[in-house]
Image: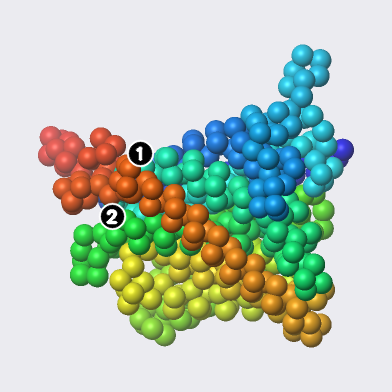
Amino acid sequence: MSSGDTAWMLISSGLVFLMTPAVAFFYGGMVRAKAILHMIMLSVGAMAVVGIVWAVCGWSIAYGGKSVGGIFGNPFSGFFLRDVIGVKDGVYTASAQSSSGSYPVTVDALFQMTFAIITVALISGALAERVKFSTWLVFTALWTLLDYAPMAHMVWDHGLLSADGAIAHLFGVAPHDFAGGTVVHINAAVAALVIALIVGRRKGFGSVPFKPHNVPFVMLGAFLLWFGWFGFNGGSAFAANGTAAYAIISTSLCACAATIGWLIVEKIRTGQATPIGAASGMVAGLVGITPSADVVSPWAAIIIGLIVGAVCCLAISVKFKLGIDDSLDVVGVHGVGGVIGTVLVGLFAVGNGLFTHGDIRLTIVQILIALIAIIFSAVMTFIIAFVLEKTMGWRISTYEEMTGVDVTRHGERSYDFAGTSLSILRRA
């Protein structure tokens, strides 16, 4: 085993874990002041529930045990991580070396747990200001086990959508999803869309402006997401090597270009280049490069960024035309960005891309895995969300929504304006 690789993967796990608090700030700043704590709590819920579910059998479904039809692993083979941990000299340690790299398998369990947490947290952005916290907690557990873990197995653990799967054998070329274009971004965005349709629109959607109450929080969240993405993409090399370093370089290039692409389109459309636009462009670029960070050249990373930034900027306005309250543009950024990034692997991949080698097979394969990911996520999420709607209910009351979910559901306010004003008057 390599202590360097082990250290890098532990650091990467920490970086990816940081992305969930970053999402909490990013989403929290974009809602109205009366709902920021609720948005942060949705991320807290994802961290708390998914972490436990992953240890119980999420890891086992995704990566442990014998594959069942190439769709999921045996849920019981790694029950409570029993296939990962062992005891030596009276202390717990890893039971074996990872099959992904030269480090203990316990590191894999940790690294992949942080991926599961951030994926679930991303979904919450489409549900701002109007869902029950209790229903969300149950959803996070069920969705992790029935949707995320099987998808991770299919793509990353020799399943149907992997290099060993049916599509690879059919076309003679392996699908490529380096760090989660399908598993994370498309998966989360489709789930967000399905639940948003079931839950319905916020009161006043389309007629009342829902303006971000704290733009610095949004910017802070975006910067922290960029930082965390170094572990997200760099860690997906599973070693402290040149591939990890290059993945970080291409990730930054794409994020830079996407920021510019978004701001150009925004300036043309509205006459202003906004901080919210810059933050959204950053995230769109980070999403877009995720599937291909290890296989596209620097110039291709820049082109992908410009395309993703511009298209996502245009895409976020579609929700108003369709009447869909994707509150914080999960579909417009993660969904559109994830699909574009997944498909563009087929055009720019250095080994067998259409533009680099004139081979169209990978492009077809990438389109197929994106479509399969969309269908799988939509079906599984609908089943889970519909059952919860009929049993627990998703929506808070109109009174709670208008008053503010922070106070009515969590019993606290983010800003004590009344207390601050009273103290000023007393000092005066």
Helix, strand or loop status at disc 2: loop
Helix, strand or loop status at disc 1: helix
Residue drawn 79% across the image and 85% down it: 358
Spatial separation of the CA atoms under disc 1 and disc 2:
21 Å
The disc labelled 1 sits on which kind of residue? Ser
x, y percent for residue 86: 77, 24
Q: Residues within 10 Å of mark 1 (few under 14, many from 20)?
A: some
Q: Which residue is mark 2?
A: 32
Q: Is residue 297 left or right of residue 405?
A: right
Look at the picture and state if 326 lies above or below 260. Answer: above
The disc labelled 2 sits on which kind of residue? Arg
Pick the front one: 44 or 222 = 44
* Among numbered discs 1 and 2, the one appearing first in the sequence: 2
Location of the C terminus (image quadrant)? top left
Q: Which residue is mark 1?
A: 134
Residue drawn 54% across the image and 65% down it: 374
Quadrant of residue 175 within the rendered picture:
bottom right
